[in-house]
Image: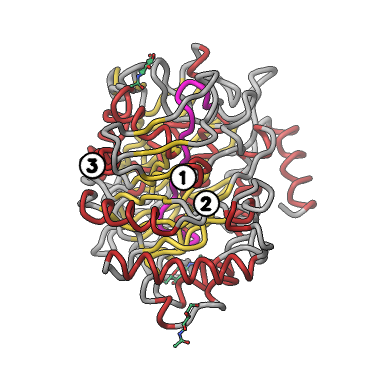
Amino acid sequence: MNPTFGYLLSLLTVIYGTVAAVTFTVPERARTGSYKYAPLDLAPVGISFEFFAFPSYFTNVTATNQCLANWKDLTGVWPPIRIGGTTQDRAQYDAGTSAYVVYSVSNPADAPSSLTFGSSFLTLAGGYGGSVVVGLNRGKNQIQNTIDAARIAASEVKNLLAIELGNEPEYYSRNGQPIASGGWSPAIDAASQNNWAISVGSAVNKRPIIQAGNSNDSPPQWGAEELIATQNATVKQYIKTYSHHNYPGGSITSLMSHKGISSNLHVFDADVAAALKENKPYIFGETNSVSGGGAAGVSPTFGAALWTMDYVLRATYSNISRTYFHHGTVGNCQYCFWGRYSMGAPYYGAYAATALLAKAAYLTALDDGSTNYAAYVSFGADGSLLRALLYNSDYFDGSGSRSSQSFELRGLTGTTLKAKRLTADSATSRVDRGGVVSFGGQTFTDGNCKISGTEETESLSISDGRTTVTLKASEALLVYFR
Ligand SMILES: *[C@@H]1O[C@H](CO)[C@@H](O)[C@H](O)[C@H]1NC(C)=O
Ligand SMILES: *[C@@H]1O[C@H](CO)[C@@H](O)[C@H](O)[C@H]1NC(C)=O
Ligand SMILES: *[C@@H]1O[C@H](CO)[C@@H](O)[C@H](O)[C@H]1NC(C)=O
């Protein structure tokens, strides 16, 4: 916001006790006017499961299936999943075990330092109804073991979308991974990725099949643009997607700031463009609010839910086709959307974003990312308007009075619109501590993720093609055009 404008807003606030509306003109159809439109994947909001924990989530956490099914009810397809993470580079395939995974830890809150997995692990992944990305080991430098696992993945996982060869390779040297023992750099990693992509891709006889990249350190040092520059046509025929990881971190207020989210995502612009130039999707294969399982004071809050919502929408608008939110150790995961006993507030943000994008073919943003106020619009395959999502990212911590911001939408037809509000007492509300977060008046039940309560909608009236609606600080609203 420019300083003069900001000053005027504060002055008006003092004088009138209310702030001037932010106004957005809604385009009548997709791909008209001066806005940018992202073509949409069927289900842009996905989940990443830490490799060793994946069987637990699917066999021993009741909420998992229902939490995923709730999104399928909106979109018509199961959300995409990715299985991987740090423990994919600690895991070795064992053709002789009937167990999903074999490991031991001294404390159930820990991730194992090494593990084996059997073919049943991949059979379990093959039972999932949505697309699956399987992350395999490169760090241990045992390519035959990885090829053996890749062959089982190719035969058992009927919805196999891609195979990753290694997770966050920039840390291999620091983690003492054998593949980095002779020296490690972006260039050495790229040569290794390329050779492995050809070896594994030709062994399973599928092209394209490899999800390449998978770094966490920001581009351009590690990333798709850097990797693509090293790849010839032989390698490229095996590459299905380019993936990056991202954990922005920060406090609740910095995390949920729309301006902050927008600038965080611009870091990836050149990488996205490089992948799209190859006609390959660019995705966030693993992401969440704060690295290392999340931050206790930030990741489980409603503010983090609002971050989740705005972040996945801004990423999607930026042509990042799918965003997989990471889920780590069951029972020790601050940013998780659900656990064995409790829901996590961030699930609600992901749900609201999924509701905006459901069955849509295009997404645009009406704002330029320079203020705390966001507006997105989704459109059907025929270009017609579906829904809009409005977001007031002003921070409210629960003390003092809660500010509000009105949003005016212009260019509308008809007389009324239906809307559903995403709200909580404050940005610090935590579902796992008894706080109430709701979307359209409804909640998701601890332990089983079933939707509960009666749906509440608001009616917005249109006059002169305009409607004005007020959002409290730290709130969002989904508006239905039909
Ligand atoms: C399932 O979860 C319980 C904790 O509720 C745990 O004690 C048990 O070991 C888990 N079983 C498996 C197979 O992961
Ligand atoms: C393409 O790159 C791969 C791996 O980087 C290399 O093995 C191969 O020889 C290259 N092919 C050509 C035709 O240059
Ligand atoms: C996303 O890609 C589409 C082309 O498919 C392009 O028109 C649009 O401008 C891109 N969006 C951004 C934010 O660059």
Residue 24 seen by the camera: no
- Provide the secondary structure element on which disc 1 rests: helix
Q: Is residue 410 left or right of residue 385?
A: right
Residue type at numbered disc 3: Thr
Q: Residues under labels 2 and 1: Cα distance? A: 10 Å
Q: Position of residue 178 (x, y in %)?
A: 59, 53
The residue positioned farthest toward the top in the image shown: 434
Q: Earlier in the sequence, mark 3 or mark 2?
A: 3
Horizontal relation, residue 213 to residue 403: left or right = left
Q: Which residues are magenta?
A: 318-333
| Left or right of 315, for residue 98 | left
The tag earlier along the polypeptide, 3 or 1, is 1
Q: Which mark is residue 88?
A: 1
Q: Marks 2 and 1: which is nearer the front?
A: 2
Q: Residue at x 42, y 76 (%)?
A: 236
Which x, y percent locates residue 179? 58, 57
Q: How many marks?
A: 3
Q: In the image, residue 29 lies at what x, y percent? A: 33, 64
User: Which residue matches tag 2?
Assistant: 140
Q: Residues within 10 Å of mark 2 (few under 14, many from 20)?
A: some
Q: Position of residue 364 (x, y in %)?
A: 44, 59
**For the residues bearing labels 3 and 2, Cβ distance under 8 angstroms:** no
Give SS at disc 3.
Answer: helix
- Most foreground residue, 188 or 223: 188
Q: CA distance from mark 3 to mark 2?
A: 23 Å
Q: Which residue is mark 3?
A: 123
Q: Residues within 10 Å of mark 1 (few under 14, many from 20)?
A: many
* Secondary element type, mark 2: loop
